[in-house]
């Protein structure tokens, strides 16, 4: 297990870096929206801000939570606790089946957690930092408030135990999921036929652009991060016939000060008179 964990960790950062570089180049030469045409400095500021948030969150996870996740996984494995560990002991399922089951359980939880973040006012205050980006691109994939990262990472600990997830399975899931997240946040468009085929399995740019719309019924749709099946099962799947008409961001956060690091960090404690989703408790 330790060997598999080390191997996944070894390639995880490499995969993140390659994905960022490739998609950043793609959206530089073939952008779906011309956010930054002739605005190189503005794009640089946007890039630096979002990557800074992502770096802070990555450091926090690495320094604080990865050890806790490994410990929780080790305890569950040693005590035969958790759904997948019980199935392994009772039914003798092979390692690959254990991994597939763990990934499905983790991805289902990611969908549920994301949906909860849109429905619970306290959680939405943190999550809206991600949605206020009016120029969504590949860097938006890591744009989350540190408070949301702390909450979601802490909740992973009991889930690892309850699901019986191996630590390397969690890191493998995180690697695959974030690769898809980078793609569907990128300011690109896949050929319509390819997007149509892929979205039967995974979340695509056409799907996730709808989720970042300022129009509240669209904001509250397409919660899946990796596998798209959860939106179909949860009846939250939605597409826009003309995605080029979508406007990203939240109407209540359009002041330039909202896009500073200070503004983003303070966003959860700010009260606003109007949000893009009035039933989010504002």
Image: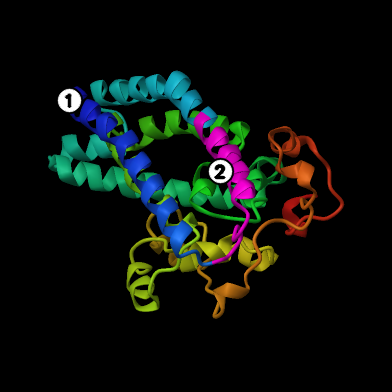
Residue 43: x %, y % from top left: 59, 49
Q: Residue at x 19, y 26 (%)?
A: 1
- The residue singled out by tag 2 in the image is 47
Magenta stretch: dominant SS? Answer: helix
Residue 8 inside the magenta-drawn segment: no
Q: How many neighbours does mark 1 have within 10 angstroms: few (below 14), some (14-19), or many (20 or more)? A: few
Q: Would you identify the image quadrant in which residue 72 lies?
A: top left
Q: Nearer the viewer, residue 59 or 159?
A: 59
Q: Earlier in the sequence, mark 2 or mark 1?
A: 1
Residue 278 locus on image (x, y percent): 78, 58
Residue 256 horizontal side relative to residue 199, left or right: right
Local secondary structure at mark 1:
helix
Rendered position, 6 above or below 95: above
- Asked whether 261 or 236 is in front, the reply is 261
The mark found on residue 3 in the picture is 1
Residue 259 x, y percent position in the rendering: 71, 43
In this orientation, which residue lies closer to the viewer: 45 or 176?
45
Which residue appears at 77% of the width and 46% of the height? 256
- Judged from this view, the residue extending furthest toward the front is 38
Circle 2 sits in a helix, a strand or a loop, which is it?
helix
């Amino acid at each position: 297990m330790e060997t598999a964990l080390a191997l996944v960790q070894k390639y995880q950062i490499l995969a993140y870096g390659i994905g960022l570089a490739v998609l950043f180049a793609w959206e530089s030469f073939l952008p779906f929206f011309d956010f930054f045409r002739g605005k190189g400095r503005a794009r640089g500021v946007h890039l630096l801000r979002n990557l800074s948030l992502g770096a802070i969150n990555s450091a926090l996870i690495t320094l604080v939570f990865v050890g806790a996740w490994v410990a929780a996984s080790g305890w569950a494995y040693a005590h035969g606790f958790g759904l997948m560990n019980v199935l392994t002991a009772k039914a003798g399922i092979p390692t690959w089946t254990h991994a597939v089951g763990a990934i499905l359980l983790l991805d289902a939880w990611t969908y549920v957690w994301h949906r909860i973040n849109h429905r619970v006012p306290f959680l939405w205050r943190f999550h809206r930092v991600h949605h206020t980006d009016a120029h969504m691109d590949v860097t938006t994939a890591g744009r989350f408030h540190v408070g949301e990262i702390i909450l979601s990472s802490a909740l992973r600990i009991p889930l690892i135990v309850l699901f019986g997830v191996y630590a390397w399975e969690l890191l493998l899931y995180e690697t695959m999921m974030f690769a898809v997240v980078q793609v569907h946040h990128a300011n690109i468009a896949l050929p319509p036929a390819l997007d149509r085929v892929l979205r039967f399995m995974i979340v695509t740019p056409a799907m996730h652009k709808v989720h970042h719309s300022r129009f509240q019924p669209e904001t509250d749709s397409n919660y899946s991060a990796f596998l798209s099946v959860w939106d179909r099962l949860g009846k939250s799947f939605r597409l826009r016939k003309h995605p080029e008409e979508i406007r990203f961001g939240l109407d209540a956060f359009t002041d330039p000060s909202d896009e500073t690091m200070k503004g983003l960090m303070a966003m959860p404690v700010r009260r606003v008179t109007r949000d893009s989703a009035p039933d989010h408790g504002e």
